[in-house]
Amino acid sequence: MDSQELYEQLEVVEKSSALIGVTIQNMKDTIHKLIDENSSLKIENAHLREKLDALELVDKELDTKHAQKYGLSNLEHLYDSGVHICHNFYGIQRDEVCLLCESLLSQGED
Ligand SMILES: [Zn+2]
């Protein structure tokens, strides 16, 4: 190998090294972008999870209220049909107004 060949090979190695350097820098930039994006997504995910938890809590409360209203409505029908709904006389026919029954019904109205 003469000095001209050696010089040309060195130039090829130099260009390859420069290309490798650019590729490494591009990969570093991509990794930085992915790390930033990952951090943003983690924060967004945490916020969304908090909102979801809050919505699920509201949903549960609504279900409970609905169930209570439905139960109260059934008791009202039963009482209106002339049957006691109070603990003392539950299920027994009534001839007149029962303050215990009415107390139960009024407790559910809020
Ligand atoms: Zn009663």
Image (tube, rainbow, N blue to C red):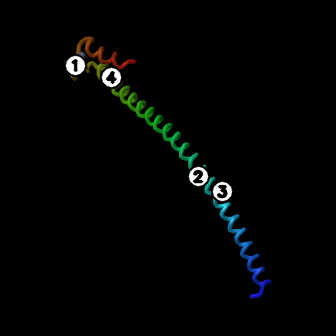
Q: Which mark is residue 25?
A: none
Q: Find out whether the residues at labels 3 and 4 contact each other: C-beta distance under 8 Å.
A: no
Residue type indicated by callout 2: Ile
Image coords of residue 82 (percent x, y) = 27, 18
Q: Is residue 4 left or right of residue 71?
A: right
Which three-letter amino acid code belongs to the residue tagged 4? His
Q: Earlier in the sequence, mark 2 or mark 3?
A: 3
First in residue order: circle 4 vs circle 2? 2
Label placed on residue 35: 2
Seen in the picture, residue 38 relative to 6 is either above or below; the reply is above
Q: Earlier in the sequence, mark 2 or mark 1?
A: 2
Residue 29: which disc? Answer: 3
Q: CA distance from mark 2 to mark 3?
A: 10 Å
In the image, taking residue 43 as reference, residue 67 lies left or right, namely left
Q: Does the Cβ of the disc 4 residue fall within 8 Å of ligand 1? A: no
**Secondary-structure class at tag 4:** helix
Mark 4 vs mark 2: in front: 2
Respond yes or no on whether mark 1 lies under 8 Å from ligand 1: no
Q: Secondary structure under badge 1?
A: loop
Q: Is 110 positioned to the left or the right of 8 in the image?
A: left
- Total marks in image: 4
Which quarter of the rendered image does ligand 1 occupy?
top left
Circle 4 is placed at which residue position? 77
The residue sitting at 68% across, 68% down in the picture is 20
- The residue carrying mark 1 is 93
Q: CA distance from mark 3 to mark 4?
A: 71 Å
* Whether residue 66 is situated above or below residue 9 in the rendered picture: above
Amino acid beneath label 1: Gln
